[in-house]
Amino acid sequence: MTQRFVLALASLGLVACDGCGPVEHASAPVADPVAPGAGAETSPEPVAYEVHEWGLVRGTSRDQVMLSGPHQDEIPVPLAKPVLYFHRSGDGPLTVRVDVTIPDGRVVEHWPLAELTEEGARLRWPAVAVTTTTCSGARYPAPSEPPCDAIHAPDACEAATLATVETREGACLEHGGARFDHLFYRAELRGAPALPLTIVREGTALRVTHAGGDAIAGSLVRVRRGAGRVTVAAPPAPGGAVVLAAPEAAASAGAEALGASLSAAGLTPAEVMAFRRAWDRALFGGELAAAGEPGPVAAATPMGGFALPPSDDALLYVLPAASADALAGLSFTPAPRGVRRAIVAWIDVEANAPARP
């Protein structure tokens, strides 16, 4: 078996929506309606909600695995731990149908358990009650229970680790007679996903070119994980380029910059810290978000699909919403007032590095 990494070219995707208009990606938090003046007649605020999502895609690999004879299949690219938090306002009941579509891949696991069709390409939670309360301490599956019982080494079940990413601030979700802080899915993508940035080495520096059409929120973070050093830079505008020098700043600066990028994409501070509890150690080599933060820190975050060693030279950035849509489509009925997607691309700069031993 031989394996190698290559970097993908950029493309944009659209979100399909069953039974509702297109989901609008908001760029800033949506303010609640202004309260009427003193003494004015008031009526109940109409119920509304928005969805916040974070996750991570380890892009991009086209490593070939020989299955039999001349036939070759691409190793799937993991889309790891996307979690969906709901924030609601207004009065009255709210029940939402949630659909996840993987255009070129399949859902590997999800929680809570729901409907999985089209050979895993479509996931549906048909009736999720979005309540006016918050909750924590949901039940998560044991290794011997679905979906974990169908996942085998070297893969690991992410659903069993979801206590680490509860925020205790969004709406409590009711599904199948149980209560949950968030929804979760994990996917495998066939082939190299289309990402907006391309990378070329220039000595110890990297030239990063933006071939996509949408702006990138926050910063670019180049990480030399073994050395514990980072470079942080503003992303190039569409059609532009930027040169990233060899990393010299402390890893903590990279973790803070990535957190600020997630915030710029629309996540709340609690959601940013949930991401950091899950991924700081894998991305930067330390427990940078652990001190003083509620909730457990993941000791070893599973990467979906197969075991990938950490890259010693990596680029991190938050994908524009359209690029995230191309990887995994989300639709909601009734439609939310906004969806804030913060999928982090983790790019292995070492194009010839093996994906696994």
Image (cartoon, rainbow, N blue to C red):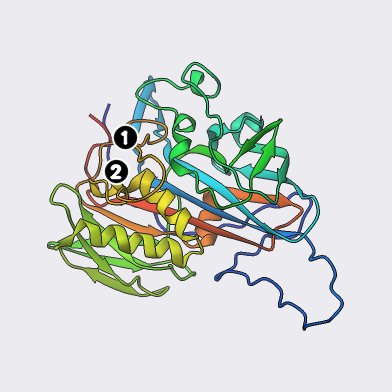
Residue 302, x across and y down, in percent: 37, 34
Report which quarter residue 205 is drawn in.
bottom left
Query: What number is the disc on residue 242?
Result: none
Instruction: Indicate left or right for 188 with 258 as reference.
Output: right
Instruction: Indicate left or right for 283 with 205 as reference.
Output: right
Instruction: Indicate left or right for 157 with 185 as reference.
Output: left
Residue assigned mark 1: 300
Residue at left 43%, top 36%?
Answer: 76
Give the residue type at disc 2: Ala
| Residue 225 to residue 189: above or below | below
Query: What number is the disc on residue 282?
Result: 2
Residue 59 in sight: no
Q: Quadrant of the N terminus?
A: top left
Report crowding for label 2: few under 14, some 14 to 19, many 20 or more residues within 10 A (C-alpha).
Answer: many
Residue 151, x across and y down, in percent: 46, 22
| Residue 189 to residue 276: above or below | above
Q: Quadrant of the C terminus?
A: top left
Secondary structure state at the residue bearing disc 2: helix
| Residue 194 to residue 297: above or below | below
Near-viewer residue (290 or 229)? 290
Residue 64 in sight: yes
Near-viewer residue (99 or 77)? 99
- Tag 2 and tag 1, C-beta contact below 8 Å: yes
Q: Residue furthest top?
A: 144
